[in-house]
Image (tube, helix red, strand yellow):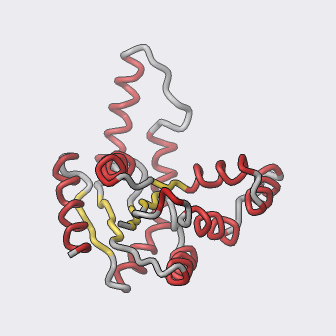
Amino acid sequence: MRLIFLGPPGAGKGTQAKRLTDKYGIPQLSTGDMLRAAVSAGTEIGKRAKAVMDAGGLVSDDIVNQIVSERIEAPDCAKGFILDGYPRTVPQAKALADNMRKKNQVLDAVIELKVDEEALIRRIENRVAETIAAGGTVRSDDNPEAFRKRLTEYREKTAPLSAHYSEQGELVTLDGMADVDAVTEAIERVLEKASA
């Protein structure tokens, strides 16, 4: 089972990916984790990524695509994987499709969790208030202003992926505002249909 999760920050992708990981024994692959692993393993591509990051630059699509390509060949991905945070752009989506075709792999589903952005911002405000009330410390990026910035960035850069996968006939959109269990059930139905 190979799938991509799309949706803005706070849409519940991480929660749903964890449930699928536990149920199917497939890894959730995040770009950040893959980059850090490649750097710490000292692979050739990891060294290139480290040089760019050490210089304060953004790792190029070429490097990210190669890291993902190598990662999805790992033994723990034999039964499948969940991509979260990749692809971020249409060119990355096209590179992923090429890489998978060369490996004789196919995507089973591209699932987008649609959410009400204002409701997400209220969730963040509540979480911050609860954390403060409990005497905890709030992460510097865990505030409504920073979150709005991340939502805007998502809309500008990543939202075109929805259109891309929709044109390919691969996109399934689910209500990310539904109850967590209801979202899980909806995802399960999509996956059952895909494997049928």
Residue 164 point in image, percent of width and height: 42, 80
Image quadrant in which the C terminus is located = bottom left
**Closer-to-camera residue (160/84):** 84
Nearer to me, 125 or 7:
7
- On screen, residue 125 versus residue 179, left or right, reads right
144 shown above or below 157: above
Comparing 127 with 64, the one in front is: 64
Image-based side of 66 in relation to 24, left or right: right
Is 44 rendered above or below residue 149?
below
Q: Quadrant of the N terminus?
A: bottom left
Residue 103 seen in render: yes
Q: Residue at x 45, y 74 (%)?
A: 160
In the image, farthest residue toward the top: 135
For the point 51% across and 51% down, which residue is it? 149
Left or right: 21 as drawn, with respect to 41: left
Q: Does residue 11 appear anywhere in the picture? A: no
Question: Which residue is depicted at the point 28% across and 54% down?
Answer: 116
Residue 80: image quadrant is: bottom left
**Total numbered labels:** 0
Q: Residue at x 46, y 61 (%)?
A: 83
Residue 127, image x, y percentages: 36, 31
Q: Quadrant of residue 66?
A: bottom right
Give the x, y percent position of residue 158: 48, 67
**Which quadrant of the figure has residue 60?**
bottom right
Of 106 and 96, nearer the camera is: 106
